Image (cartoon, grey):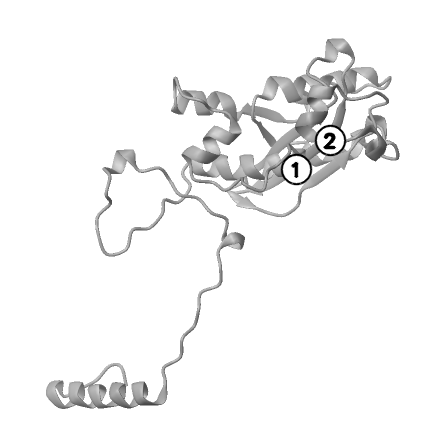
Amino acid sequence: MASIRQIFLDTETTGLETRDGHRIIEIGCVEMIDRKLTGNNYHQYIQPDRESDEAALAVHGITTEFLSDKPRFEDIVQDFLDYVSGAELIIHNAPFDVGFIDYELSLLSNDLKNLEHYCDISDSLVLARQMHPGQRNSLDALCKRYDIRNDHRQLHGALLDSEILADVYLAMTGGQRALLLGGEASESEDSITPSFQRLSEKPELAVIHAKGDELSVHQLYMEQVEKESGKNLWH
């Protein structure tokens, strides 16, 4: 069976509308194959040759000075297309990001086609609205609903938002529920919200070794078990 390659993508831009000449300044992508994050991510800052709107700058915090020595879109476009080609792109509010990427492609003089020519595109916002009609379905709202940490997200960033989207998508599409040890859930099965956490974020388990007197008591207990039952599987 062929592997399923999915890429979670986000962009940051100088403003909201391409019709006002706004451009992409950052692209972040996170790769997942067969529902496992691979670490083969794509991240690029881009020189837009224009200033960011004040409102956009307040969201992403990426200054014109920081971008001044970064490559332009035409310099990175082939690497980007090679990376996403053949994959399913998963984007939260896809028309916004795809619209900007298609706008950038249209500004180039070569024979490049729209993004959907190179890969399939899925909108996780549409999926979230189907699953949670009438509720807020922003990335922040979904993080809260699925108990996904995003407290380190002070400003928007394309790669960070793509990583968070990957976690949200896994939770929405069957991420493992939190295990309840030694008892029933306090809520009905239908009302439990999946608790999702990356393996890399879990703390190491403490290892507590038995002391000498504890080992002596254990040995006496094992001998008593063997005496009463005639055998001891734990020796």
At 66% from the left and 45% from the top, the residue drawn is: 40
Task: For residue 77, say whether it is visible.
Answer: yes
User: Label 1, label 2: how many angstroms apart (C-alpha)?
Assistant: 8 Å
Give x and y (percent) for residue 116. 65, 21
Drawn side of residue 171 relative to residue 56, left or right: left
Looking at the rendered structure, the kind of residue marked 2 is: Glu
Using the image as rendered, state which of residue 61 and residue 141 is in the foreground: 61
Q: Closest to the observer: 178 or 65?
A: 65
Left or right, 110 with reference to 93: right
Answer with left or right where residue 222 lies relative to residue 198. left
> Residue type at mark 1?
Leu
Residue 124 image position (x, y, % from top left): 51, 26
Label 1: state its secondary structure: helix
- Quadrant containing the C terminus is bottom left
Q: Residues within 10 Å of mark 2 (few under 14, many from 20)?
A: many
Is any atom of residue 114 visible in this view? no
Disc 1 designates what residue? 159
Along the line of sight, which residue is nearer the eye, 77 or 87?
77
**Residue at x 33% of width, y 50% of height:** 179
- The x, y position of residue 233, in whole percent, is 24, 81
Residue 223: percent from the left, percent from the top? Answer: 20, 90
Q: Are marks 1 and 2 in contact (CB under 8 Å)?
A: yes
When asked about the image quadrant of residue 103, the answer is: top right
Determine whether the residue tagged by mark 2 lies in a helix, strand or loop: strand
Residue 95 lies in quadrant:
top right
Name the residue beneath numbered marker 2: 26
Give left or right: position of 21 versus 42.
right
Count residues near mark 1 (Cα–Cα under 10 Å), then give few for <14, some for 14-19, many for 20+.
many
Residue at (84% x, 26% y) in the render: 74
